[in-house]
Image (spheres, grey):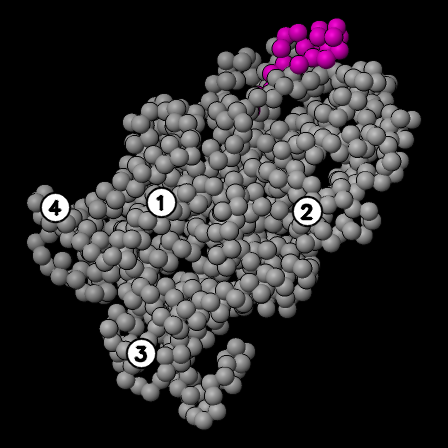
């Protein structure tokens, strides 16, 4: 309700009392309407939790227990030791098969993600040349997973080299060893990076869904005309729409953050104040976008269609929540600047995992403020108190 | 009967296309989105921004760093001279990683045959971090091989030869673009169907429709076919763009592909009409559309593999028609899967579509308020 108090002063002195009363009446009317059609309540309170649960568990880039076919043409102590390094890893699920034909069949039918192939001369080549080839075939359709699996295979191979060297009594000397230090998310759990971004995606949906229909509905049902003959000004109508849905949206946000921290155990390293300040700016932008859609469309059917098109998929794909913006071609990077969710994702990922980094928070926060002002004033500009 | 259904279809097309805004929304944004998303949605990393903190006076350190500079995946942003410079760069996300070569690097390498290089990575995006570390390792690997060969060290006892089938260069665009075909086909179908019955209910024209001699099955057909026609049309355009613009190979047959598209449309239209006939207001219809659309996309394997999900979520995906369509699209495009191998993906979509269409038709008459 802070927002409401803040706006009182801006409404001018002369008829301050009257305006306040009118606004209160409009807000009350909107709340009643919300209570009558429980779908708004569902949007604000049920949707964030359901979606966060579903996505928090459902979206994961961590490939574990990847089924790999293992074809060993001539089993020996050497091959057993090599395969052993794949068996005791949480990344692999070795499936022993007797020949390549079966293995390729399994790869085609998606029963395995890849094949480890040790030829019959594995032990022999090891002894004679000192280097035996191991063939690894992967299903490359899911390129990202394939690349991660390549990394795991390399890791297993290095571990095997080390064990081999130790059992032969010669210490393994690798010229340069990489010592990796991962900041902010040392276990590299994809959940830790996806869930904060998800909050931004979900808030986009909530904001737009809550308001996308409301102005169009008033026009369509003719109640807008009834409002027109009253002394309320158009900005009061807009404000009367904004306040209740802002309250609902913030409720949804609190639930989302609570779920992220309480259930998914995402560390919240930055301050809660920054988190909520940035989110409320974002919510204003999202609600403003919804209102604008509603005002431009003038009928609910088109407003609904526009809301479906412009909210979810852009927020999902262009916000950097899952696909790295830095890897996109630059014209596309320019386009992502139009997506409000982009700025919130950057702030949330940083506030949750890294802490209060001013150089991330200020520019993105400013961008959010700008977006909020832009959408709200566009909405104000596009709406007028007269009949067509 | 067909004449009457045809009349309904004409009416439905008029309702959809007579409003210029609606006409625009159904046709133009999906095309634009395909182009934008096709380029945007990629897991491939290029130009990873990194900084160098080299304290080593020797030549070996410089040689190792040359490997980074020559790699197409990395872009050098800064040379650091103090430990304290590392944190601000990473915090600000100006660099994804910092390569730190200690002062004893060359000396250790010369005396002990072994040295270590420190790599500090921003883990906020865990996937990017993992992939970047993979690239780092392969650069160091190459350096090691060359160094070992030069200094007469023995080769490791086994060499890995990795190859990838179906997508030899591991381009994630080949994986994502067929997925976008499914995404946009679903969105367009929802646009056309999810609000259509709710709108008529709200405006009262649905009651009028119910008192005409139309049977529910005919009304159902009248509502479903326009969505189907628009869906097939847009899917075709999107598939053509995927093949000719994004150059994704299509190895399988068009017959298999279109069987998949048809069945997917039937199931998506079923869900859309079902939502629409459950909803009393358009607001509820919109909510229902999102409540289906969003989980359907997230749980389809579009961006993250279904195999990574916990098993109870994997069970939920079994009722998601998009999951099957995703398999079909990628199978037909990249793997050239034959028709018979995809039967297991075809029938669940037919069942989902059938059940939902029946329910929707049943709800037409029952849900009067």
Which residue is the site of mark 1?
B31
At numbered mark 1, what does the secondary structure look like: helix, strand or loop? helix
* Residue B321 figure quarter: top left
**Chain containing the residue with disc 3:** A
Q: Cβ–Cβ below 8 Å for labels 3 and 1?
A: no
Residues under labels 3 and 1: Cα distance?
A: 36 Å
Q: Are marks 2 and 1 on the same chain?
A: yes
Region of the chain picked out in magenta, as a range: A112-133
Q: Is residue A216 left or right of residue A192?
A: left
Say whether residue A125 is magenta: yes
Other-residue count near label 3 (Cα within 10 Å), few / some / many at <14 / 14–19 / ≥20: some
Q: Are marks 3 and 4 on the same chain?
A: no
At numbered mark 3, what does the secondary structure look like: helix, strand or loop? loop
Work out whether mark 1 precedes mark 4 in sequence or the reverse, and give the earlier one: 4
Residues under labels 3 and 2: Cα distance?
A: 51 Å
**Chain containing the residue with disc 4:** B
Other-residue count near label 4 (Cα within 10 Å), few / some / many at <14 / 14–19 / ≥20: some
Which residue is the site of mark 4?
B6
Residues under labels 3 and 4: Cα distance?
A: 42 Å
- Indicate the position of residue B326 as horizontal and vertical percent values: 41, 36
Mark identifier at residue B95: 2
**Chain containing the residue with disc 1:** B
Which residue is the site of mark 3?
A385
Residues under labels 4 and 2: Cα distance?
A: 61 Å
In percent of the image, x 45 and y 62: which residue is there? A206
């Amino acid at each position: 309700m802070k927002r409401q108090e803040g706006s009182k002063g801006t409404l001018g002195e002369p008829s301050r009392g009257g305006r306040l009363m009118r606004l209160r009446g409009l807000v009350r009317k909107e709340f009643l309407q919300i209570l009558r059609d429980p779908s708004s309540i569902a949007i604000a309170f049920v949707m964030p939790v359901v979606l966060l649960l579903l996505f928090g568990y459902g979206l994961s880039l961590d490939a574990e227990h990847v089924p790999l076919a293992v074809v060993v043409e001539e089993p020996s102590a050497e091959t057993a030791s090599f395969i052993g390094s794949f068996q005791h890893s949480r990344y692999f699920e070795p499936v022993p098969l007797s020949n390549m034909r079966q293995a390729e069949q399994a790869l085609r039918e998606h029963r395995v993600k890849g094949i480890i192939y040790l030829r019959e001369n594995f032990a022999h080549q090891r002894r004679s040349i000192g280097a035996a080839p191991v063939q690894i075939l992967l299903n490359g359709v899911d390129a990202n997973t394939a690349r991660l699996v390549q990394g795991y295979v390399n890791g297993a191979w290095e571990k095997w080299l080390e064990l081999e060297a130790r059992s032969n009594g010669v210490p393994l000397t690798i010229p340069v060893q990489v010592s990796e230090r991962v900041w902010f998310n040392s276990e590299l759990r994809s959940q830790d990076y996806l869930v904060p971004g998800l909050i931004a995606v979900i808030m986009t949906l909530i904001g737009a869904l809550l308001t996308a229909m409301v102005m169009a509905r008033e026009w369509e049902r003719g109640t807008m005309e009834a409002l027109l003959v009253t002394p309320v000004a158009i900005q009061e109508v807009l404000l009367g729409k904004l306040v209740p849905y802002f309250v609902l949206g913030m409720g949804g946000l609190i639930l989302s953050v609570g779920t992220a921290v309480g259930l998914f155990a995402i560390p919240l390293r930055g301050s809660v104040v920054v988190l909520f300040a940035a989110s409320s700016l974002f919510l204003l932008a999202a609600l403003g976008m919804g209102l604008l859609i509603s005002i431009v469309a003038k009928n609910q059917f088109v407003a609904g269609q526009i809301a479906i098109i412009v909210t979810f998929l852009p927020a999902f794909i262009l916000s950097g929540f899952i696909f790295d913006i830095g890897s996109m071609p630059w014209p596309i990077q320019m386009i992502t600047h139009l997506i409000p969710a982009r700025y919130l994702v950057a702030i949330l990922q940083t506030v949750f995992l890294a802490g209060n980094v001013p150089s991330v928070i200020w520019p993105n926060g400013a961008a959010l403020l700008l977006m909020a002002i832009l959408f709200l004033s566009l909405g104000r500009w596009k709406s007028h108190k007269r009949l067509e | 009967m067909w004449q009457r259904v045809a009349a309904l279809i004409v009416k439905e097309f008029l309702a959809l296309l007579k409003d210029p805004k609606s006409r625009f929304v159904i046709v133009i944004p999906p095309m634009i989105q395909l182009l934008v998303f096709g380029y945007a949605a990629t897991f491939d990393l290029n130009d990873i921004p990194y900084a160098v903190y080299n304290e080593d006076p020797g030549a070996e350190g410089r040689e190792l760093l040359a490997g980074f500079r020559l790699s197409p995946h990395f872009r050098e942003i800064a040379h650091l001279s103090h430990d304290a410079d590392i944190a601000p760069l990473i915090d600000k996300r100006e660099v994804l990683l910092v390569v730190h070569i200690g002062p004893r690097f060359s000396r250790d390498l010369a005396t002990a045959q072994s040295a270590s290089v420190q790599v500090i990575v921003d883990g906020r995006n865990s996937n990017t971090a993992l992939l970047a570390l993979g690239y780092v390792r392969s650069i160091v690997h190459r350096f090691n091989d060359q160094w070992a060969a030069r200094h007469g060290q023995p080769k490791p006892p086994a060499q890995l030869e990795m190859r990838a089938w179906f997508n030899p260069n591991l381009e994630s665009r080949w994986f994502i673009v067929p997925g976008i075909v499914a995404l946009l086909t679903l969105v367009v179908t929802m646009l056309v169907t999810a609000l259509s019955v709710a709108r008529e209910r709200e405006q009262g024209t649905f009651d009028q429709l119910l008192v005409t001699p139309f049977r529910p099955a005919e009304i159902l057909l009248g509502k479903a076919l326009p969505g189907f026609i628009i869906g097939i049309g847009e899917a075709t355009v999107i598939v053509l763009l995927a093949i000719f613009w994004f150059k994704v190979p299509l190895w399988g047959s068009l017959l298999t592909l279109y069987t998949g598209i048809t069945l997917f449309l039937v199931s998506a239209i079923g869900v859309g009409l079902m939502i629409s006939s459950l909803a009393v207001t358009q607001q509820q219809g919109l909510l229902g559309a999102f409540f289906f659309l969003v989980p359907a996309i997230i749980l389809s394997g579009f961006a993250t593999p279904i195999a990574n999900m916990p098993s109870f979520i994997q069970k939920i995906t079994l009722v998601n028609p998009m999951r099957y369509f995703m398999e079909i699209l990628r199978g037909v495009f990249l793997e050239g899967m034959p028709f018979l191998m995809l039967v297991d993906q075809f029938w669940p979509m037919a069942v989902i579509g059938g059940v939902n269409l029946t329910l929707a038709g049943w709800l037409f008459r029952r849900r009067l308020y």
